[in-house]
Amino acid sequence: MTSRMKTTKPWAGRFSQATDGFVERFTQSVSFDWRLAPYDIQCSIAHVTMLARVGVLSADECEQITNGLSDILDEIETGKFAWKQELEDVHMNIETALVDRLGEVGKKIHAGRSRNDQVATDMRLFLRAEVKNISSLLLQNMQALVALAERETDTLMPGFTHLQAAQPVTFGHHIMAWYEMLKRDQQRLRDCLDRINVMPLGAAALAGTRFPIDQSFTAELLKFSTVAENSLDAVSDRDFIIEFCADAALIMMHLSRFSEELVLWLSPQFGFIDIDDAFCTGSSIMPQKKNPDVPELIRGKTGRVYGDLVGLLTVMKGQPLAYNRDNQEDKERLFDAVDTVKLCLEACVNLVPSIRVNRAAMLAAAEGGCLTATDLADYLVLKGVAFRDAHAIVGGIVQHAMAQGRDLAQMQLAEMQKFCDKIEEDVYGYLDLQGSVSARDHTGGTAPDRVKQAVAQARQYLSTLGDAGNGSA
Ligand code: ARG
């Protein structure tokens, strides 16, 4: 805050004492809500344009206020604006600056509104813009994943359950699972926009206003799709922020799981992938280390967004209607969630194209673990053995193979026939990794042809989403 000079507060009329210095520091929000300034000004310009339309302001007054606000925005954007802590928040800082410039006319801006509907509107405008940014980053990540999957549609790797090698899958299929998660995240954000896009203006402090306002007109100017149906709800609702944070928490959960896999795959024990040195960091003591700090930090930052969500739910849980100052606590949490998600999505979008796949290591891991045991059981079922019996027979064969350090595909026919005489030469088609994945050729299956289809469908889907990736204004 640049000034310690005492400034008259817009609400000072009924007070006979100056605000205590500590209370000013305790109640101020301008140190963080200054970033709402462009939205606050957009909101105010729409408000006065409407007031002029309904005759509460003259055209000349409206023009003076609009020009004054535009000049203030200019000052803010060029860093020349002097924010004052004693003016509490972004709204009173801007209003006071306007009055300083215009005198009497500036004082007319606040007719028919309150900071309560103003701040709710600013937050919605801010979040709508940021949801579009996040949506577009999600889209870029989806594109990066599809490009990676496309290069690896035939690459064999072990698929895991319980982090134990389970059945062979293709790496392209594995990557497309991540695409599906981000696709849902992107759809959730699109849904969330419907609830954000509601205009609170007109609710004023809580009960509405006597002025002959034209809310549809203001909503049109601000590109809101609807006007809030209840003034008490309009000023006190923060569901749209909580809903966004829940969506953001899910995005972070997905990015964190993805990061966890990258960390595992990058470890020499897996050695499935490598990423560019530029995306890794070293150890200050162990010269051999190449550490995956970027995915680790994404995993670590997930906790912030979960915290933001739980913090916001808690801010709201005890509040009677309508506006309470508790609501001021929504800002830092929302800003943190927005900033963290954007930062982590940006990290991922840079990281994914730098992934180099070690196909030989993936294949070696898939070859060693009798991963086609389920295929062998399925083979026996086709030969008339009941699945439970087949499971037990194959268990015996697996035990035998593992004791000798061999994979199922390396077993002699005669050895296997000792466990079950229904096994014939055609069994090898079931034991081979390639055959195993290719046979899973159904919706959602891991067959390379299916993965190619999934990639094509994804490209088609992405092309329908447009720039912002949200399909709506
Ligand atoms: N800085 C406040 C907030 O963030 C603005 C609204 C203040 N309203 C009031 N009646 N004190 O919520």
Image: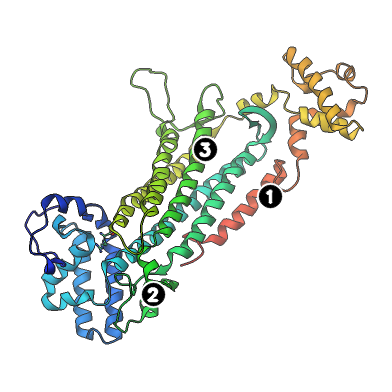
Q: Position of residue 30 (x, y in %)?
A: 22, 56
Q: Amino acid at mark 3?
A: Arg
Expressed as whole percent of the image width and height from the top left, the position of residue 307 reads: 39, 43
Identify the element where label 1 is drawn. Answer: helix
Q: Position of residue 156 (x, y in %)?
A: 67, 33
Task: Tell me where residue 128 appears, x and y as whole percent.
Answer: 40, 61
Pointer 3 residue: 257
Image vertical order of residue 286 relative to residue 112, above or below: above
Q: Is residue 432 left or right of residue 159?
A: right
Residue linked to disc 2: 219
Q: What amino acid is found at the position of numbered circle 1 in the picture? A: Gln
Q: Is residue 184 left or right of residue 431?
A: left
SS for tag 2?
helix
Q: Secondary structure at mark 3?
A: helix
Q: Is residue 243 above or below residue 268?
A: below
Disc 1 target residue: 453
Q: Is residue 429 visible?
A: no
Q: Residue at x 66, y 49 (%)?
A: 454
User: As drawn, is 419 to the left or to the right of 359?
Assistant: right
The picture quadrant for ligand 1 comes to: bottom left
Circles 3 and 1 in contact, beta carbons < 8 Å: no
